[in-house]
Image (cartoon, rainbow, N blue to C red):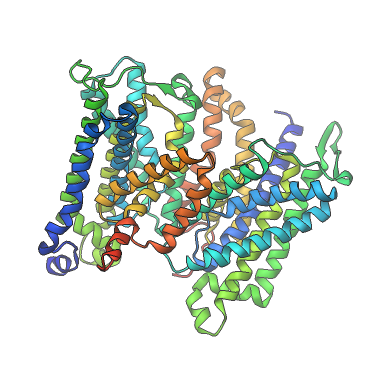
Amino acid sequence: MTQTLAASSVLPSQQTDRANALPVAIFLILALVPFGAAFGPESYVLGLFTRVMVFAVAALALDFICGYGGLVSFGHAAFVGIGAYAVGILGAHGVTEMLVSLPVALLAGAIFAYLTGTVCLRTKSVYFIMITLAFGQMAYFIAGSLAPYGGDDGLTVRLRSTLLGFPILQNDRTFYYFVLLSLLVVYFAFRTIVYSRFGRVLRGARENATRMATLGFDVFSFQRVGYVIAGAVGGLSGFLLANATEFVSPAYMSWQRSGELIIMILLGGLGTLHGAIVGAAAYLLIEETLGGITEQWKLIFGPLLVLIVLFARGGLLGLADRIRGRPSRG
Amino acid sequence: MSTGLVVVQILNGLQFGVLLFLIAAGLTLVFGVMDFINLAHGVQYMLGAYLAVAFYALTSNFFITLLLALAAALVFGLLLEFLVFRHLYDRDHLEQVIATFGIIIFLNQAVKTVWGAAPLTLPIPEIFSGSIILMPGLLYPIWRLVIIASGLAIGLLLYILVGHTRVGMLVRAGATNARMVSALGVDIRRLFMIVFGFGTMLAAFAGAMIAPILSVEPGMGDTVLILAFVVIVIGGIGSMRGAFLAALLIGLVDTLGRSFAIDILRLVMPPSPARTVGPAIASMLIYVLMALVLYFRPSGLFPARGR
């Protein structure tokens, strides 16, 4: 049993070095951005790349359940929003301590994922896409009705989270590295999970859930644990987002946001993990660049998405692979 | 909560449900037969409304406008099918979602560029303007009744088309097992095109009919699209009967919920929290309904696809 699984799993050891080159490069670039930014419009560049990494965290979680678990969630923005609201609501009550708000954000995302996952995972394929969308919309409307916390208008986070009372995130550059560290931790955590026994079961269920069930795995429980992990990491992304924008609003949970996250992971290349980071960066940078050229940037961006789907199968990474003459990854 | 108000809200709910049905019908056909998630279906509804406004400015006659708008929407829909959708049928759902999401982004912006971001209006056709007396002291706009009637008529037409014609038989067969239909010698691509064109026209028809009582603006298709998806998922993908019943159900639940949630909540809680919680519960109601239906019937109420 383990042999068949091992044989079908990706990343044979001889490819490891090559497969590692890109993630290493990505994190190296991200680590060096603040130094480059010092020569230009520093706060703008730092802000932009902070946003890239915040969304990359959320996209990683989505890539984990979607690319490896085969569960296309169209309500992923809800987790991000819930994490953000955890920071916002605690902040409104004067609690800015990270040791409180960070676990709360993670836990809130995890609990929401556990409850909705219990219902969602009963359904398959399109029905799953739609029911996760429904729960996302529910979270969106609940957030909009939180009258004491700004309702539809959202609420301002007056103070970034503190650590043991010290305002360590107040400095933009420190905050940037804090987000980078979070991204790094999340990336390696997911890598570990994906290649663990748990990850193999999850991938096995993606390929053939019936066979995995016949082998004696409780597929539902495995998928739910995966979903809860993704929810918690979504909450983490929300924690970072609230601190980055110093603002929380129901718009964070809108279905367009969930759609954008799906675009990001598809743009980078599904089921590669580092593809999620590339995709988040590509999406936000394209948006930023086109937005700088013309106000009508969506006229270009929309068709661009269509072209990417039609001609760049496997996302940007797949495209890069094919240009270099390597077979596209599966 | 007077009887009159309840009657009016039930009619409003029916009118909303019928509108949802017109959109969901096309969606469920395309989805059921081609296994294709068309997020761009909502912007086709929006386009129908905008085309109606544009042609009305030229012709000043609603009925000619309606015909022209339907024809234009059909041509545009088939063009989209030819250029984009045709290449997506074999792809997985995720890629379909992204590509059609791209089309939404494009069309919402294109409409804003051509017609401006401000909401537009379309007058109600002369003969159907004004209101009718339903009960003593109870007026109801005729145009809304026209929408209900035309929606029910199209429902009947679809029932006959899908249930009792050859094309309908192929559509039903396609929804059950498209590959088998193709193997039996039916030109499935042509069937897809017919179904797709028809669905586009239904969405555009819904847009043109609703334009006189709704403001026509960019993004108007997005909310409706989500609701239409809720409808077809509750009804069971590919099932026309399911879409019809689910559309009326959603229309009624949503409208009645929005109108009476606060009143009902006041029976069990003090007025002030009821006023804050009410609207939230009302907007969530249909999603709760959907979650419940899918929990007990994971493939909707009337699943079409055989296992």
- Please say if B60 is above or below B167: above
| Residue A220: % across, % down | 29, 54
Nearest the camera: B220 or A302?
Answer: A302
- Please say if B129 is above or below B229: above
Q: In the rendered view, does B21 fall on the left or right side of A126? A: right
Look at 62% across and 75% down and name the residue there: B169
Q: In the rendered view, does B296 fall on the left or right side of B168? A: left
Look at 47% across and 57% down and name the residue there: A306
Nearest the camera: A212 or B196?
Answer: B196
Nearest the camera: A77 or A109?
Answer: A77
* Residue found at the far left of this picture: A14
- Please say if A54 is above or below A243: below
**Quadrant (top left, top right, bottom left, bottom right) of the N terminus of chain B:** top right
| Residue A122: % across, % down | 37, 54
Q: In the rendered view, does B179 fall on the left or right side of B266? A: left
| Residue B195: % across, % down | 62, 67
Look at 44% across and 69% down and name the residue there: B90
- Could you tell me if residue A184 is visible in this image? yes
